[in-house]
Amino acid sequence: MLDLTNIRAILAEHYDLAPSVEKAEAMADIYARMDRVVPAADWAIYAPYVAAINALKKERNAVILAHNYMTPEIYHGIADFVGDSLQLAIKATEVEEDVIVQCGVHFMAETSKVLNPGKTVLIPDMGAGCSLAESITAAGIEEMRAKYPGAPVVSYVNTTAEVKAASDICCTSSNALQIVEAMDSDTVIMTPDQYLAQNVANESTKKVVFWPGSCIVHELYTAEDLRAYRELDPEVKIIAHPECTPAVVAESDFTGSTSGIIKWVHDNKPAKAMLVTECSMASNIADELPEVEFAKPCNMCPYMKKITLEKVLYSLHTMTEEVIVDPAVADKARQAVQRMIDLSQSLAK
């Protein structure tokens, strides 16, 4: 566990991180992207960190990749690229900088390292894990293969490098159905998210069998809650992530990955929208869509929220919290991820 007292003492020796209205005003263009959801007083606290990180990125020849679940001050303030798991995986293959700082959870940083074995990959807090990724191991993959001989294994990118290495191909929530449909088998094994697999199975021509894992954020939403919300506010459009249960998906007006959700809201601009996913999503797109009123059921990912401006600055300053993947594991994992990227890109043509 990171020693925040020590981190703050080290940073204080090198940076002036006191709240600053002057620095906040100097970066008014950045603040304009989030001023609907971040109070001015909070921005004065964040601004010194944002300024220090953006300057240090240039010194370190670093790039920051941030998931859509990051808080607004990270998402809008310091990220060079934002997106869902597929978008970040693809972007990781394209970056030219020597250092990648992954603002997300550990499996995402592992994926960046797998795709960039020669680059330094940092995650600001090694404790930013994932309950879903931790629900499956390589032994679990072998158990599924023994139960369904000959069936290909499609593993969600929300898995460790070890699990990816034991799989045939990866998928994300945005391409899971397409990946499954492209498999040359009547039966397909999906791991580890049981609800993503069930939602895919409801649309697929394949027999989809699955590992019983789930996301601690998305499994909390219930169909009963959504029906109750509709009764209170019939105008609201409910947009759900496919890691939610099939019952929740059935109650929604649209289901998609984080990038798919963002696109749907941008394209349709409903008067009221309820994003049934991690609660930072609505905050991150609120300023782009002033005409949309966001209802905010807030199930927060405790792992994503371990990534803070303070930890990003410390990681970049000290070049610590480096992600290492065994080369033999990385080689096999890279094949599974690259197959996903290649197949996704070919299907998109």
Image (tube, helix red, strand yellow):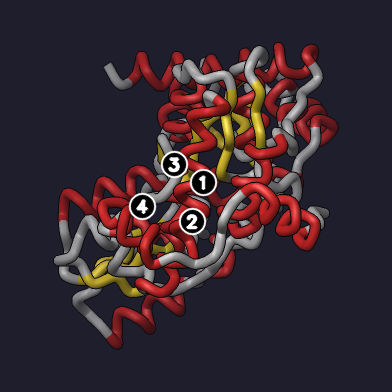
Cβ atoms at labels 2 and 1 below 8 Å apart? yes
Looking at the rendered image, the disc whose residue lies closer to the viewer, 3 or 2, is: 2
Residue depicted at x 51% and y 46% = 52
- In the rendered image, the quadrant that contains the N terminus is bottom right
Residue depicted at x 42% and y 58% = 72
- In the rendered structure, the answer to whether residue 37 lies left or right of residue 243 reads left
Inter-mark Cα distance, 4 to 3? 26 Å
The amino acid on which the numbered mark 2 sits, given as a three-letter code, is Pro
* Pointer 4 residue: 255
Residue depicted at x 27% and y 67% = 273
Q: Secondary structure at mark 4?
A: strand
* Pointer 2 residue: 48
The residue lying toward the viewer, choosing from 329 and 15, is 15
Query: Where 331 falls versus 51 (above or below)?
Result: above
The amino acid on which the numbered mark 4 sits, given as a three-letter code, is Thr
* Pointer 1 residue: 52
Tell me which numbered mark, 3 or 2, is placed earlier along the sequence: 2
Tell me which numbered mark, 2 or 4, is placed earlier along the sequence: 2
* Residue 84 quadrant: top left
Residue depicted at x 52% and y 43% = 53
- In the rendered structure, the answer to whether residue 58 lies left or right of residue 251 reads right
Query: Where 21 falls versus 87 (above or below)?
Result: below
Q: Secondary structure at mark 2?
A: helix
The amino acid on which the numbered mark 3 sits, given as a three-letter code, is Ala
* Pointer 3 residue: 79
- In the rendered image, the quadrant that contains the C terminus is top left
